Image (tube, rainbow, N blue to C red):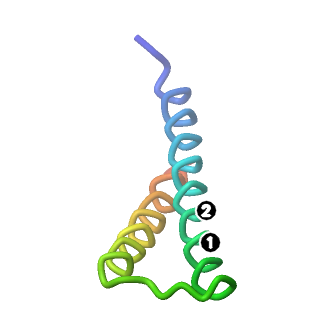
């Protein structure tokens, strides 16, 4: 049976990588908004809120509980 500590460490890295991808998407969206002057459509705003929610959940999941 695999060691649960290594599984937890690996999943924490995966959560962190997905969080960084969400952060990059939001950063690119803000770049397009403020630098290029492109206004987002309503669906884009909903997607941004979804990426923010996913990012917050991933940060919470990446933090190890109980050391």
Instruction: Characterize the local packing of mark 1: few (<14), some (14-19) or many (20 or more) Cα atoms within 10 angstroms.
Output: few
Q: Quadrant of the N terminus?
A: top left
**x, y percentage for residue 44?**
37, 76
Q: Taking 65 as reference, is 37 above or below it?
A: below
Task: Identify the residue at horizontal 60%, vertical 78% (top origin).
Answer: 32
Q: Taking 57 as reference, is 10 above or below it?
A: above
Q: Taking 31 as reference, is 7 above or below it?
A: above
**x, y percentage for residue 7?**
49, 28
8 and 35: which one is in front? Answer: 35
- Dot label at residue 53: none
Task: Identify the residue at horizontal 61%, vertical 69% (top origin).
Answer: 28
Task: Identify the residue at horizontal 58%, vertical 50% (top origin).
Answer: 16
Q: Is residue 46 left or right of residue 52?
A: left
**x, y percentage for residue 30?**
59, 80
Asked which secondary structure carries label 1, the reply is helix
- Give the residue pinned by disc 2: 24
- Residue furthest to the right in view is 35
Quarter-wise, where is residue 19 in the image?
bottom right
Task: Identify the residue at horizontal 53%, vertical 30% (top origin).
Answer: 5
Q: Is residue 45 left or right of residue 11?
A: left
- Give the residue pinned by disc 1: 27
Asked which secondary structure carries label 2, the reply is helix
Instruction: Characterize the local packing of mark 2: few (<14), some (14-19) or many (20 or more) Cα atoms within 10 angstroms.
Output: few
Q: Taking 6 as reference, is 27 above or below it?
A: below
Q: Is residue 48 left or right of residue 27?
A: left
The alpha-carbon separation of the residues under discs 2 and 1 comes to 5 Å
Label pair 2/1, CB-CB below 8 angstroms: yes
20 and 5: which one is in front? Answer: 20
**x, y percentage for residue 42?**
31, 84
């Amino acid at each position: 049976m695999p060691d649960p500590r290594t599984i937890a460490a690996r999943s924490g890295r995966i959560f962190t990588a997905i969080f960084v991808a969400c952060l990059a998407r939001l950063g690119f969206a803000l770049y397009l908004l403020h630098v290029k002057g492109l206004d987002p459509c309503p669906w884009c705003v909903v997607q941004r809120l979804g990426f923010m929610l996913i990012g917050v959940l991933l940060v919470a999941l990446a933090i190890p509980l109980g050391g």
